[in-house]
Amino acid sequence: MAAPFRPNIVFIMSDDHAAHAISAYGAGLNSTPHLDRIAREGVRMNAVFCTNSICSPSRASILTGTYSHVNGCATIRTEIDHRLPSFPEALQATGYRTALFGKWHLGVSEQSNPRGFDDWLIFPNQGEYRDPVMYSDDWRGTVEGYATDIITDLSVDWMRRSRADHPEDPFCLLIHHKAPHRPWVPHPRHESLYTEGAIPEPETLFDDHAGRSQVIKDLHMSIADHLTAHDLKQEIPEELRGEEKRIERTRWAYQRYMADYLRTVQAIDDGVGTVLDTLDELGIAENTIVVYTSDQGFFLGDHGWYDKRLMFDESLRMPMLVRWPDQIPAGSVCEAIGTNVSFAATFLEAAGIEADTAMPQQQGRSLLPIMRGEHPADWPESMYYRYWEHLDVDHRAPAHYGVRTRRYKYVHYYGDGMGAPGSSDEILPAEYELYDMEKDPAELTNVVDDPAYADVLAEMRAELARLQAEFQDEPYRGPDTPRPQWGPTHGY
Ligand code: CA
C-alpha cells in the first residue's frame, strides 16, 4: 500500500487534564502555547465526552472502542478483557510501526502487558513523577528524571529511530503522560509559575449543592475537607482549621492545589512543543495526525471539588485537539458530540481499516467527518454515560448512569455497586438530576422535580433507555439485575 495514504498517528493522552486548564479552551487559568498550536493548526473539539470518568476504564474504552460493560474494565481496580482486540493491534497487523510510552494502568500481571506494540515502556500502576520505575517485557528499572520529560524523550527518540529504520512504514505512537494526576508534583523549572493567591477562582467554588442529590452532598472530594497533606505538600495551618474557617481554608487549599496542578500541566505543554518540533524536523507534520486528549476531565475547584467520576461537565468533558493538515481545516471548532468509545474507529478509518471488521465488538463511530467540519445528517445528538464504582472508600462517589444532549443532562444515581470492584455493598435509594445547560451552564439548579420540565424529563428518560438498548447495557432494576462479567481485579 502506498505510504502517503496512511497517516502517522501521534496520540498524546495525559491523565486528569481538564479542558479548562488548556488556554485554547479560553478559561483564562493558564497559558499552554504548544497545546494551543494544535488547536490553531487543527480543530478544537468542544463536545467530546468520556463514557466512565475514571482512569483505567477510559483507557480500556479508548483502546477497544467499547463501553465498560463490554470490555470488563468498570473501575480503577479492574483489568481489561484481554481477549478484545485494540486499535494498536489492528494498526500493527496492517503494517504500522507502533509504540507506547508512559502510563498504562490496565493491570501489572504479565497477561495485562500491552499488546500490539513493537516497543513499549510503561509505569507500574499510576507511576511516580520523579525517577519513576518503568518496565517492558524484558526490562525493569528506575529511570532518572521527571516523568513527563522522560516520556517526551522516549517518544521523540522512537520517532527518529522509526523514521531512520523504517522510512516507508507509517507509525502510531501513544504518548501517555502521568501528569497532571494527583499528587501534582511539578518540575523545579516551573516552581515560580502560577503564583499562589493569583489563580482565578471558579464561579462555583462555594457551591452549597442545594437541590442536588444527597449522594452528591456526601462526596469526599471537597477542596475544603478532603485534600491531604500529601496533596497540599503541607499540613493545613492551625488558623485555617474548623468549620468557621471553611471559606478561608477553601481559598487557601484551592491556590495550593491549582498552582501545582497547573505547573505539572506546563511540563506536558513543553513536551508537546518538542513533539511538534520533531515532526517538523522530520518533515512529516503534513501527513501525521496529532491528537491531544486526557482520559477524562477534572474538577478544578468547580462545585467546591477536585477529582472526577461524576457527570458534571468539568469531569465528563475530555479536552481534544486534533491536527491533520491533510484533512482538518486549521483553526476550526467542533461542537458535535463524540465519545472516547469512538477514538479507535477514528484511527482505523484514518488508516483505511474497516473498524467493525478489525474490531468486531467495537461500539464507536469514526469522528473524522465532524473533525473535518462535516455535518452528517444522522450524527448522534446525545451520549450515554455510566460510572460503576459505588461509594469507594476515598471519594464516596455513587454509581450512576445518564444521558447528555447538547442542551440537557439527565443523571440517575441508582444506588448499587453491583459487585463492581472497589464498590461498597451499601445500597441507597435512587436519586435523579436534570440540568438545562442552556439556562444553567454551571449545572447549579436541579430541575428534575420542576413541572415545567416534565416533558423534557420524559424525553431524556426515553433517550437513556434508547441508548442503553443501543449499547446493550442493562438498566438497573434492583439488586437482582444481571451483572456484567468484570475483568480480573488488581491493586491500583
Ligand atoms: Ca485519569
Image (cartoon, rainbow, N blue to C red):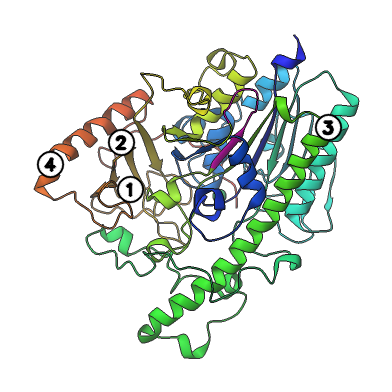
Q: Earlier in the sequence, mark 4 or mark 1?
A: 1
Q: Which residue is mark 4?
A: 454
Coordinates of residue 86 in the picture (x, y in percent): 61, 26
**Residue at (46, 24) in percent of width and height:** 363
Q: Nearer the viewer, residue 238 or 69?
A: 238
Residue that mark 3 sits on:
282
- Distance, label 2 to label 3, CA atoms, is 55 Å
Return the disc, 2 or 4, that comes first in the chain's sequence: 4
The residue beneath circle 1 is: 416
What is the x, y in percent for residue 371? 52, 28
- The residue labelled by disc 2 is 481
Secondary-structure class at tag 1: loop
Query: Reading the chain from its start, which is encountered first: label 4 or label 3?
Result: 3
Q: Which residues are magenta?
A: 320-329
Q: Can you tell which quarter of the image residue 335 is in?
A: top left
Q: Secondary structure at mark 2?
A: loop
| Disc 1 packing (10 Å; few <14; some 14–19; many ≥20) | many
Q: Nearer the viewer, residue 269 or 100?
A: 269
Mark 1 and mark 2 residues within 8 Å of each other at the beta carbon: yes
Closer to the observer: label 2 or label 3?
Answer: 3
Vertical arrangement, residue 302 with respect to residue 473, above or below: below
Residue farthest to the right?
165
Predominant SS along the magenta part = loop
Q: Amino acid at mark 1?
A: Asp
Image vertical order of residue 36 relative to residue 266, above or below: above
Q: How many angstroms separate mark 1 from mark 3 (CA)? A: 53 Å
> Label 4, label 3: how many angstroms apart (C-alpha)?
58 Å
Q: Secondary structure under badge 4? A: helix
Q: Secondary structure at mark 3?
A: helix
